[in-house]
Image (spheres, rainbow, N blue to C red):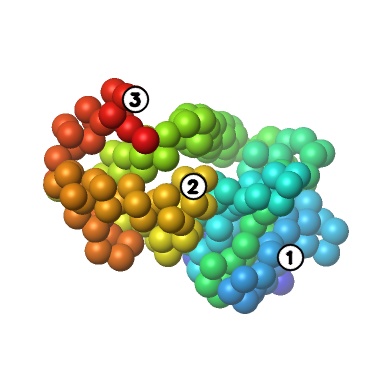
Amino acid sequence: MLEQTELSHKLALSAFLADVTLPGTKVSTQIFRSGQIVSDIPRGIPSIGLITRGRIEVYSVALDGKDILLNELSAGECFGICNLLTQCELETVLRCSVETEILYIPKAVLQEAMAANGTLALRFAAVCSEKIQFLLKRIELLTMQSCRGRVIAFLLAHSKEGGEVIFRGSREDLARHLGVSRAALFRELAVLQTMGAIESHGNLFHVIDPGQLEDLLYHPSNTK
């Protein structure tokens, strides 16, 4: 059981759950070590999880065992949203990349809150829309046949003002995120640096010439 003040503080981390009143007797918290797999059915209770501290990697695992890093969730983000109103299980694998604390909210409790709170229901719809848009972009990226095209699309999509691109994780994590081999990723980054289109330092990238990257991306004959 959580004290109401502590619960409110944790819920405030989420744009979706902020200002929502939930019974402290119905929620629970759990801490996971780095590398542990996370479930959305703690103690057999279907729940959504709000990350209050730490980071979780979201993987899609194929039948042949190949995994692709789909997303990374950090404090304030939730999982278990997409199947909140259905009986199906999550199709993804969730793994903690660092020690992570999760606030579990039973789905039945959240459904009751949404039924009584139209604003919360609209927030839920907005979150689902954002997830759909995110997945469409991921599908677009992963269906690219060119390794260089995937790398360029990632850099352009995540480039901030000034051209800075920060990826939370190792180069190996980035390779899994893009669905390419580590060697192929290193090769394409080296080529783009040689062209003068980007600079690379660890997991920090800097897009120097976005126009050149766009030209390479939209002219497949120039990519490998």
Local packing at callout 1 (Cα closer than 10 Å; few below 14, some 14-19, many 20+) is few
Residue 186: percent from left, percent from top: 36, 55
In this view, the mark in front (2 or 1): 2
* Amino acid bearing label 1: Thr
Q: Is residue 94 left or right of residue 14?
A: right
**Considering only vertical position in the picture, is 54 above or below 125?**
below
Q: Is residue 214 left or right of residue 137?
A: left
Residue matched to label 3: 220
- Residue 25 is marked as 1
* Amino acid bearing label 2: Val
Q: Pointers 2 and 1 in contact (CB under 8 A)?
A: no
Mark 3 or mark 1: which comes first in sequence?
Answer: 1
Judge by depth and name the residue closer to the eye, 200 or 110. Answer: 200
Q: Can residue 206 be seen in this view?
A: no
Local packing at callout 3 (Cα closer than 10 Å; few below 14, some 14-19, many 20+) is few
* Amino acid bearing label 3: Pro
Q: Can residue 220 be seen in this view?
A: yes
Q: Is residue 191 left or right of residue 9?
A: left
Q: Distance between the residues labelled 3 and 1?
A: 57 Å
Residue 51: percent from left, percent from top: 55, 61
Mark 2 or mark 1: which comes first in sequence?
Answer: 1
Q: How far apart are marks 2 and 1 (CA)?
A: 45 Å
Judge by depth and name the residue closer to the eye, 2 or 198. Answer: 198
What's the residue at 64%, 47% (across, down)?
A: 60
**Considering only vertical position in the picture, is 75 above or below 176?**
below
Residue matched to label 2: 180
Q: Is residue 30 left or right of residue 189?
A: right
